[in-house]
Amino acid sequence: MDKLDAAAIDLPGVDVRVVERCISTNTSIFEKPIQGPILLAAEEQTAGRGRRGRRWHSPHGAGITFSLAAPLARPPRELAALPLVAGVAVARALRALGAPVALKWPNDLLVGEAKLGGILIESRAGVAVIGVGINCRRVGGLAESLGRRVAFLEMADRNRVIRSLGAALLDALREFEAHGFGAARAHWQAMDAHAGRRLRVRLAGGKIVTGVNDGLALDGALRLATRQGVREVRSGQVLSARAA
Ligand code: BTN
């Protein structure tokens, strides 16, 4: 597979850096002051991080692991929608490259029911960091070790993919900064892998809730139609989806 190359990623106005190895691109990007957009891509992360405290596994050179950091001036209460905004941008860019990607709330990238990739958002003092991990080269045993189905992009030119995703994320941040979540919400719902399905969701406190997916609330919460009425989930994990 191709080597990562900052000159080939080449995003105008962005400080693009490529490293052979780092702990986590989301962690390392904060090591220097962030004044303008920075994109940091790594061939390997020694402690890649996933959502909800999980690890992100990607052997050396086998995937796409990068973080984009950019100043973002939106009130903290609106940042809850940022994971969905980023999910839309990445999924649309991957579709434009020919990958049949759909979204699982809030921003898992699926092909069918198999996980192709994920996104980890962190924000500090007016800077948003969007970390993207995508499985590229088929790695034997990954599905078994994770206990779930996984998909692989298998596109040779990772630099081109990172350039497309980086450009899409910068556009999405500009749109979000200027107009908020409105337009991305409709795009998210149009790419929802589980639209209208009956979902089992584990809430942040551990409680399991079952209900029919009723789309997104205005702030990006997942609406579940339960026997007790509509419940809006702001933090949780979708465990399973079946026909309603
Ligand atoms: C998830 O689905 O749980 C989110 C996975 C996010 C992984 C990416 S890889 C690049 C960036 N650096 C990290 O440590 N994590 C994100």
Image: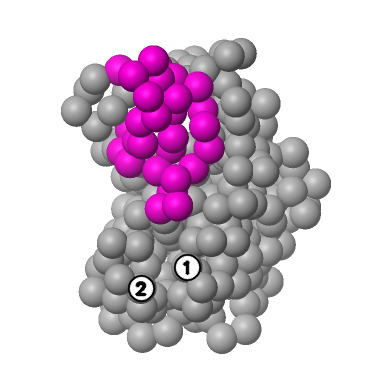
Residue 215 visible somewhere in the drawing: yes
First of labels 1, 2 by sequence position? 2
Residue at horizontal 35 percent and vertical 31 percent from the top: 231
Q: Secondary structure at mark 2?
A: loop
Percent across and percent down for residue 211 are: 44, 20
In the depicted view, which residue is nearer to us: 180 or 88?
180
Residue at horizontal 37 percent and vertical 24 percent from the top: 229
Residue at horizontal 65 percent and vertical 42 percent from the top: 191
Percent across and percent down for residue 14 are: 53, 81
Label 1 CA crowd tier, 10 Å (few <14, some 14–19, many 20+): many
Percent across and percent down for residue 62 are: 58, 42
Residue at horizontal 49 percent and vertical 61 percent from the top: 181
Disc 1: which residue? 180
Q: Is residue 222 magenta?
A: yes
CB within 8 Å, label 1 to label 2:
yes
* Vertical side of 69 occupied by 4: above or below: above
Magenta residues span 208-237
Percent across and percent down for residue 73 are: 36, 78
Disc 2: which residue? 74
Q: Across the whole image, how many numbered discs are drawn on residues?
A: 2
* Vertical side of 177 occupied by 197: above or below: above
* Vertical side of 64 occupied by 203: above or below: above
Residue 135 visible somewhere in the drawing: no
